[in-house]
Image (cartoon, grey):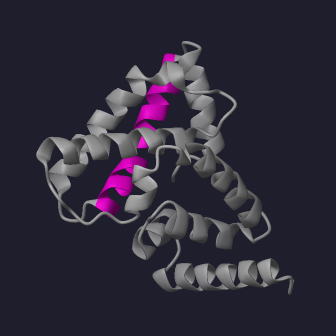
């Protein structure tokens, strides 16, 4: 099961305050998040994914002092990951299709990403926990339906239905229908 934003933030702050166990837990929890993040963007490049996971963990460690304790942690960690991915593309001088390239290249987007994450949390807070988790896993965290189903202990069909119904409820709320 994936750690929540709040749990990751608590571990990061604990690590900054010298709690080695909290910091170890944070780094361990980041590995699957980063694998998923890079895996979705670098399809078929498993070695590159693993290299980027390790480079990002080292960069998070090196730059941990720049983390603002009052801000969401995951947005900060993903910003570090995006920069590591861009660095790798520059080093290798390769041109590849990247899903969401605009997001990766907009350095000023960090504040917007943090605000968006908080807006998503608020929106998903109005759904059932099952629907919110299915949407967060598949649409926000980038897991496949199968990965989300395995993580939640549900069938693929159950996750698909939860995502569909949750998105339908969100759309109705945003239109003012519900």
Residue in the picture at 44% in, 75% down: 145
Nearer-the-camera pick, 103 or 85: 103
Residue in the picture at 76% in, 71% down: 127
Magenta-highlighted stretch: main secondary structure? helix
Work out whether 88 lies above or below 96: above
Q: From the viewer's perspective, tell me whether residue 89 is left or right of residue 9.
A: left
Residue in the picture at 48% in, 23% down: 64
In magenta stretch: residue 2: no
- Is residue 31 visible in the rendered image? The answer is no
Nearer-the-camera pick, 97 or 71: 97
In magenta stretch: residue 26: yes
Return the x and y of residue 68 as percentages of the image width and height. 62, 27
Q: Residue placed farthest to the top in the image?
A: 18
Return the x and y of residue 164 as percentages of the image width and height. 61, 85
Tell me the quarter of the picture where residue 94 sits.
bottom left
Work out whether 33 lies above or below 56: below
Return the x and y of residue 138 as percentages of the image width and height. 50, 69
Nearer-the-camera pick, 144 or 91: 91
Tell me where the magenta segment starts and ends, as one range: 20-41
Residue in the picture at 63% in, 40% down: 72
């Amino acid at each position: 099961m994936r750690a929540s934003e709040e749990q990751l933030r608590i571990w990061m702050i604990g690590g900054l305050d010298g709690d080695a166990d909290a910091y170890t837990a944070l780094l361990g929890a980041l590995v699957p998040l980063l694998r998923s993040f890079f895996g979705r963007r670098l399809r078929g490049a498993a070695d590159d994914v693993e290299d980027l996971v390790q480079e990002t963990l080292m960069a998070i460690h090196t730059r941990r002092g720049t983390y603002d304790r009052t801000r969401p942690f995951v947005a900060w960690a993903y910003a570090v990951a995006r920069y590591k991915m861009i660095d790798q593309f520059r080093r290798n001088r390769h041109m590849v299709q990247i899903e969401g390239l605009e997001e990766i290249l907009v350095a000023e987007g960090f504040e917007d990403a943090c605000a968006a994450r908080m807006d998503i949390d608020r929106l998903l807070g109005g759904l059932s926990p099952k629907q919110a988790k299915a949407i967060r896993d598949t649409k926000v965290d980038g897991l496949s339906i199968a990965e989300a189903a395995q993580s939640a202990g549900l069938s693929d069909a159950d996750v698909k239905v939860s995502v569909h119904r949750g998105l339908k409820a969100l759309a109705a709320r945003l239109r003012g229908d519900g």
